[in-house]
């Protein structure tokens, strides 16, 4: 091969190599920016649509034996499942424990009644009372028991005017303003119309003239908007010949829609059995005895409660209720004031307090009423240490009162629940409050000067089973911290201490 031929062959090889290095495209020259060795292929977009089976094809398939069997199996399974769920729901409803019907509750059963026998000492008169209603709402007061407010000279029946308010207290317009504001705050107002409240005989020996005046006055005040009438010495008043007329004047023709007007009676110095009989024969809505004041023995107190608990919607409990006096006259120490507040709020019936009981207002000597103190939330930097300690004590007791009032208002067991005595001694007692499937509560109090140990038991015949332990809900004993668990087999309570225990419904 000649030299020229070899050169031509090498050029051909180089040309082939150069062609391999050129970019591969579909047609024509490469686009600007394309790199060597890249290949771009355009794939046409083909529209693919799934049409499924036609109607004729579906009808052919649907009629085949396999599909017919499948449809019947699914239909049977559906109805069997539906019937099974229905049967299960019926079994659950039948086997579930039935709720106990709520007993009839009236406004005087819902919360504490607050007695103000002396408006001047409480708030400086009627206008001052109107300004203090907000503070009474804070401690969940449901009813005020005012007065007596009428004019009368002690033991002089000719001076009796049951329709005239003592001008030293306020005017009729002031009283109407109190009624209006109280009702806006869901506080009812009861007016004490005990005729001879300043004298020796509250009924002036029960003359017909007095009873007629009382009937006329009751109609007057009820028409003005008063929610109830209070009378002292109910055991005497209910024996008057015109007693049915007096009841009719207060209670009227009651309907389900109208708010009921309450007839409240106070009795003193009679045993629990006689109180129970008086509830039945007198027809009053609420009887307030003085059994807690006259009976200081725990065994006697629990017997009194045993007698009256079935009539709890018509029984009120108070200390000094027959002649309104501060709770601190009986409860002479801070611990005892806490104890009696707890006891009154948890007994089966309506708690009745006198103004100042929420702060431990101390009584004064003689017949004068103690002046109410309104400094529990005020800040006074100029007070000495003793005054600061007293104010702190009042504030603490008021908070305790408020907590008890709130607890009773929301817990059915305390509001209208069944009552079971658990234990009692000369200086202590314990009882259980239960309502249907609600939380259950045990009250244990010891007003003695020494510690007390109580074994809390309940006979199986009662139908309620006590658990082994319960939780401390509220306590004044440092050894029984709130939220802790305590054994019911034997509970130790310090002197002048009180505690509420709680345990759930377990079926």
Image (tube, grey):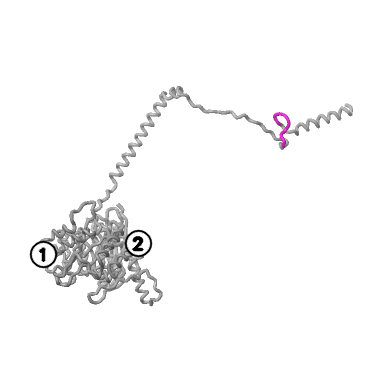
Residue 13, x across and y down, in percent: 81, 30
* Magenta highlight on residue 212: no
* Picture disc at residue 485: 2
Of the residues tagged 2 and 1, which is closer to the observer?
1
Along the line of sight, the residue nearer the viewer: 502 or 120: 120
**Element under label 2?**
strand
The residue that label 1 is drawn on is 208
Along the line of sight, the residue nearer the viewer: 87 or 315: 315
Along the line of sight, the residue nearer the viewer: 491 or 236: 236
- Determine contact: label 2, label 1, CB under 8 Å: no
Q: Is residue 204 left or right of residue 101?
A: left
Q: Please identify the quarter of the rendering in which residue 296 is found.
A: bottom left
Q: Can the viewer see residue 164?
A: yes
In the displayed structure, 306 sits above or below 97; it is: below
Residue 448, x across and y down, in percent: 26, 71
In the displayed structure, 95 sits above or below 83; it is: below
Magenta stretch: give its range: 25-32
In the displayed structure, 178 sits above or below 74; it is: below
Along the line of sight, the residue nearer the viewer: 471 or 194: 194
Residue 471, x across and y down, in percent: 34, 60
């Amino acid at each position: 091969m000649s030299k020229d031929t070899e050169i031509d062959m090498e050029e051909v090889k180089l040309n082939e190599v150069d062609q391999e290095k050129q970019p591969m495209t579909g047609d024509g020259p490469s686009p600007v920016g394309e790199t060597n060795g890249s290949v771009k292929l355009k794939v046409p977009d083909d529209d693919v649509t799934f049409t499924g089976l036609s109607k004729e094809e579906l009808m052919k398939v649907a009629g085949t034996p396999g599909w017919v069997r499948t449809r019947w199996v699914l239909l049977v399974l559906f109805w069997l499942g539906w019937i099974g769920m229905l049967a299960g729901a019926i079994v659950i409803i039948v086997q579930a424990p039935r709720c106990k019907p709520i007993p009839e509750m009236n406004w005087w059963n819902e919360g504490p009644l607050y007695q103000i026998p002396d408006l001047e000492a409480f708030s400086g008169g009627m206008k001052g009372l109107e300004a203090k209603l907000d503070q009474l709402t804070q401690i969940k007061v449901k009813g005020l028991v005012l007065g007596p407010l009428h004019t009368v000279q002690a033991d002089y029946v000719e001076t009796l005017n049951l329709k005239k308010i003592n001008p030293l207290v306020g005017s009729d317009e002031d009283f109407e303003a109190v009624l209006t504001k109280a009702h806006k705050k869901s506080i009812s107002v009861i007016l004490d119309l005990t005729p001879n409240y300043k004298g020796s005989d509250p009924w002036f020996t029960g003359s017909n003239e007095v009873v007629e005046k009382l009937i006329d006055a009751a109609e007057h005040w009820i028409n003005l908007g008063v929610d109830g009438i209070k009378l002292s010495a109910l055991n005497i008043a209910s024996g008057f010949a015109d007693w049915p007329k007096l009841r009719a004047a207060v209670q009227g023709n009651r309907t389900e829609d109208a708010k009921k007007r309450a007839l409240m009676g106070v009795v003193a110095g009679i045993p629990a059995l006689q109180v129970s009989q008086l509830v039945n024969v007198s027809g009053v809505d609420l009887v307030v005895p003085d059994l807690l004041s006259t009976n200081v023995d725990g065994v006697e107190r629990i017997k009194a409660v045993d007698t009256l608990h079935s009539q709890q919607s018509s029984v009120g409990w108070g200390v000094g209720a027959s002649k309104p006096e501060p709770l601190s006259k009986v409860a002479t120490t801070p611990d005892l004031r806490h104890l009696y507040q707890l006891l009154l709020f948890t007994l089966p019936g309506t708690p009745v307090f006198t103004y100042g009981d929420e702060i431990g207002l101390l009584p004064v000597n003689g017949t004068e009423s103690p002046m109410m103190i309104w400094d529990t939330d005020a800040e006074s930097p100029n007070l000495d240490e003793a005054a600061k300690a007293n104010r702190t004590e009042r504030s603490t007791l008021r908070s305790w009162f408020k907590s008890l009032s709130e607890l009773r208002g929301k817990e059915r067991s305390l509001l209208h629940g069944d009552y079971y005595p658990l234990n009692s001694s000369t200086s202590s007692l314990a009882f259980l409050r239960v309502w249907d499937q609600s939380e259950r509560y045990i009250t244990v109090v010891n007003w003695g000067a020494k510690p007390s140990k109580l074994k809390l038991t309940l006979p199986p015949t009662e139908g309620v089973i006590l658990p082994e332990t319960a939780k401390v809900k509220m306590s004044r004993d440092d050894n029984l911290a709130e939220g802790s668990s305590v054994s019911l087999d034997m509970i130790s309570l310090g002197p002048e201490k009180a505690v509420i225990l709680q345990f759930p419904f377990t079926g």
